[in-house]
Image (tube, coloured by chain):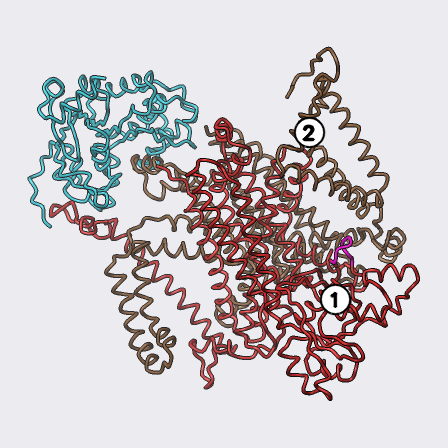
Chain colours: A cyan, B brown, C red
Amino acid sequence: MTVTLPATDYSKIISCHNVNKWYGDFHVLKGIDLEVSSGEVIVILGPSGSGKSTFIRCINRLEEHQEGDIIVDGITLSHDVRNIAEIRREVGMVFQQFNLFPHLTVMENVTLAPIHVRKWSREHAEEVAMKWLTRVGIPEQAQKYPGQLSGGQQQRVAIARTLAMEPKILLFDEPTSALDPEMIKEVLDVMRDLAHEGYTILAVTHEMGFARTVADRVIFMDGGVIVEENEPLPFFNDPQHERTKLFLSQILNH
Amino acid sequence: MQSTTSRFGGSAFRNLNLRRYWLDNVRRSWLQTIWLLILLLVTIWFAIGQLQEHFASTIIIFVVWAASVIWTAVSDVRRSHRPMTLWLKTNLYGSLSNVVLSLLLALILAFIIIGFFDWAVVRASFSTNPTVSKIQLERKSVDGKEGAAWGAVIDNFRNLMVFRWPTDQDWRLFAILLWNVILLIPSLYVFRKEVFRRSRIRRVLTTLWILTPFVVFFLLRGFKSDGLFGFLAGPIPYLNPDIAWGGLLLTLIIAVFAIVASFPLGLLLALGRRSKITGIPAWLTYGALGLIALYFFVTRSIPALAEAQTTGAQLIALWPLLLLLIAYLFQRYYQGNVVALASTVYIEVIRGVPLITVLFMSIILFPILLPPGTEILSTWRVMVAAALFAAAYLAENVRGGLQSLNKGQYEAADAVGLNTYKKYRLIVLPQALRAVIPAIVGQFISLFKDTTLVAIVGLIELLGVANLISAQPDWLGVRRAPYVFIAVIYFVGSALMAWYSRRLERRMGVGER
Amino acid sequence: MAESKLTPNPSGGQESVPPWRDIRIIGIFAQIAFVVLVIMGAMWLLGNVTDNLGRLGGFRCPDGTSSFSCGYNFLKVDSQFDISESVIDYDPSDTYGRALLVGLMNTIKVGVLGIIFATILGVLAGIARLSDNWLVSKATGWYIDLMRNTPLLLQLFFIYFGVILLFPPIRDAIQLGDLPVYLSQRGINMPGPVFLPSFATWLAFVVAGIILAFVIWILLGRREERVGKASNRAFWVVFGFFTVSIIGWFVASNSNKLDQSFMIAKSERILAFTDLADNMERRLGAANLNEIDLMVEEGELTSEEVDEAAYTLCVISESASEVNFTAELRRLNIPYTVNRSTRPDQATAKYAAGECEIYVADTVILTGERPLLEDPFAQAIVPTLERPVRISIPEIEGLNFVGGIKISPNFAALLIGLVLFTGAYIAEIVRAGIQSVSKGQSEAARALGLSESQRLRLVVLPQAMRVIIPPLTSQYLNLVKNSSLAIAVGYPDLFAVAFTTLNQSGQAIQVFLMVMAAYLTLSLSISALLNWYNKRIALVER
């Protein structure tokens, strides 16, 4: 099977062409095409089971796609172990369940990857880590264990852990879904700052406010395909597609 | 149920409703009635027997029981419980059957305790002189029942501990003991305090602990020259393990060695069993096994089929076809993952057979499996066998820990860019192993107890020494006292470890969440 | 998995991945390297085995060559060693194969009995551990701790060498109360059932009774639903079952007259069994045989006189006829003495020599032996009633026990040790299982108005079972594996027999392979059985 490829546009930091994925017989992603420019902030919306999480997990190879191409920062995702490692260095990911390492302190969580992947000295890594912890507003918690922090604090540590690797691209997989309402804001504030700083961001989230104010582009996925994509204002005010309208009405009017 | 000790005025018997008590405690169901009846009969029968045997103690128990029952009943009726009577009521005399049951159990326990005490102290002899001991035991015996010959244990104390270890080499054992104690005392403090997490002292201690097995080995085995490269001069012949190691010393050596040595293998087996490495492609499996099957079919089955007289023999001759079935099952259930298959087979085979077969195999089969002329001491063979055996069980424990770990931990490790080796070393194993420490301690306890089996294959560990005592001309046939003595050693050892494991579990449970 | 969709390389023609960096190829290479390593290891071991066997002389074919295919020929060779106890017939002239089979049967015997008794003990102890009686709960806790914290082998040695072998010799055997149960160095002797030929008939009735009980249960259940009124179901089920069984007992007793007595008429007329009693009354001058003891006590008779008058029986050892006949004599209080022979011809000779008055055997033997006597037709063959099951009671005769069930000291030590040890572990499992059912479940059950027994039966136990079964399975497996410690107390289980076989035949590898295969099969069967049960009761969860 050969796929004819359009010439790669190197100004695009992420380009996906005809990405397909199956879980057994279940077709999760059906020919996704997406181009992301450097510095762009994209919010992906969609009902549960629409494949949006699976899609962004394919971008740093937590899931393996079976057809099509994903090129991140000029590196093709393939079975090549070196490429996978390189892409993971460039792409940071924040999870719904934080996934902090409970046996390590906050500081160790943040410095782990810089020391072991970027090969920094411990002193340098801790310096950088402290900078990021200060940025997300919890420098005083550095010697605590994740289990001793609140959900919002844990998620901010997770963000600091991701940023400490100095990635170009940030993936957010429903970062606020597991949080109590009063903690959502503190995480969203951090995300908003990052967006303004020029990180390329792909976020799967249900926070419409975030999508409306911060996103450069909103993508609506359903049934494994991109149903609609547009800038936030027209997307929310004038959705084109029936499924989008239905989804927005369910989300917004309750 | 009243839980206060406040007194209510009025008639003391206002609360006494005998009819209600009768209905509740005797007539609620026919099953209860029969149970109570049987209980009563057994108690009376046992009490009469005990009255004849130990009159005084039985009477005392009976009086104490009757008094406390009456006291509790009166307090209950008057609703004026003291803490004592309340405790008695809830724990011993809650219902009529419990009242009877408590008496019966008190009598039985008294019977056991008095019997044991009589044997262990009253009728026992502590003389290490066999002749004196024999006379004392005979004189003190009641109805031909003799007490414990503790003299045999005392006389053989050194044998039980170290058996034939040369006395002039005792300094080695003390050195090992000292080394461990010196390491243990600061470790208990340093490894518990968060302050020392990245300190040099902790690193030094860890290194020393890792060195410990080697130090212990060098001291135990003994080399002619005690320098750093002293082992080049060769081992000291009279510290040959088959001769010099024995008793409790050997028990501990085998148990500790097995658990330490089984660790790397067990870890690999657990990881192997769970590995998701890309398997051998189906075409290769079917191709290779198909060719082998074909080869055997042509060279073995066809001639065998020609000779076979019965249908059974014909079917047996078709055995190469089984290879195809194996190939199919292998692809179907393991997707071509040989590593997972091999780990699983090893673990399940070892866990499916008794330890004694593995030990005997080490004694009998090792010489056959190794190149002719290789000679390995029985002690080494048994130690290796125990480690190989323990590895399979350890692997299953570790696998449990790996399974208990959240999938998100693997994903987060991947997402921050750790490679597979670092993912397991830094993230997965520390958490998985910590989760299974209690299980591993439990396994160590059973290994500690299982070392008794090496007595069957001819090594003289604790139980072996106990058996030898009864064969000494001085203490011919003395068995119970040594057995009880080593039972106490095992009991204390296992109970201590179990207690420590429970404490560890509780502490880690608090620390983590 | 949709295979075809897994393989395409997403990078297309743009950039081909060098094979040493392709994660799949690395994986496959690792697998193949592993296989090669394993095969090389196996070849090395095999090479060593061939070299060593050249010296040791295993795998010898009849034609003198050495070949792996001849490895199992030794199974057909006579074992020439004896096995102290066996479920099936065995003697040293049997083959190694049969000897190993005997060992396997012995392992299964101790395994099955061990599992049954350990389960009973464990469940009781587990419940006792949760008892609201402090003493009961504590005492059970001590028992559990003692068993779990000391080695099983030590316990076995203690029971065998420290207790059973220190029992008195047979002539001073300890009797348990007044029961016919005797403890001695030679093990335990106790009454046991003897199944007579008519047992088969009775068994058929019992089975019919069970079926009938089921039918009654179902029919009455339907009727209850139809009528809407509870009937006395349990009573009718029990009644139906017992009626059929009791009828069956009498039918079986009267239909099979295979077991018969044979006696010399002498001067006395014997036509039916009851004549024996009449004769005895006449001999002793007693009005009623039940009064013999009384008469002896009052001095009207001496015990020597009774002994003299007692019938002497010629019997064949370990025959069901003896048990059947003597049980009937005891029932009628007829005094007798027994003269045992191992073979019918010996018994016939004794009978002909007048050593006994009555020749007890089954009809086939009696009709075969009668013509060999001097005056065949002076001897009458008299039928006795045959019960389907008789209880055989052990009696001391000389230096041995006769009748009843004999439990060897080795088997007793092993079984008791295994049961006590495993029982403690099962108790902990049962306790944990019951405690795992949340309090809320019990409260909900009480709130619904279920009785205590219904609460346990319908709510607590089914839920506890799910927690109990998996660890229980591994305890059963442990029990079977631990039964291999039999070798320490001299019980001929599979491993002990295999060890003797190995020592005698020198076929170490084959014997070990067979033993391991046997234990694996046993283990897999037990876990398959319990997994099946576990799946059946498993909770359906999302």
Residue drawn at x 69%, y 60% is C191
Quadrant of residue C404 within the rendered picture: bottom right
Residue C266 in the image: x percent, y percent?
79, 80
Residue C383 sits inside the magenta stretch: no
Front position in the image: B209 or B431: B431
Quadrant of residue C415 within the rendered picture: bottom right
Q: Is residue B282 left or right of residue B169?
A: left
Main SS, magenta residues? loop
Residue drawn at x 23%, y 20% is A207
Amino acid type at mark 1:
Leu
Residue neighbourhood size for the residue with mark 1, other residues' Cα within 10 Å, grouped as few (<14), some (14–19), many (≥20)? some
Residue B280 in the image: x percent, y percent?
28, 57
Q: Is residue A136 left or right of residue B462?
A: left
Chain containing the residue with disc 1 = C
Q: Which residue is mark 2?
A: B22
Q: Is residue C266 visible?
A: yes
Residue C214 in the image: x percent, y percent?
48, 50
Q: Which residues are magenta?
A: C174-180
Numbered-mark total:
2
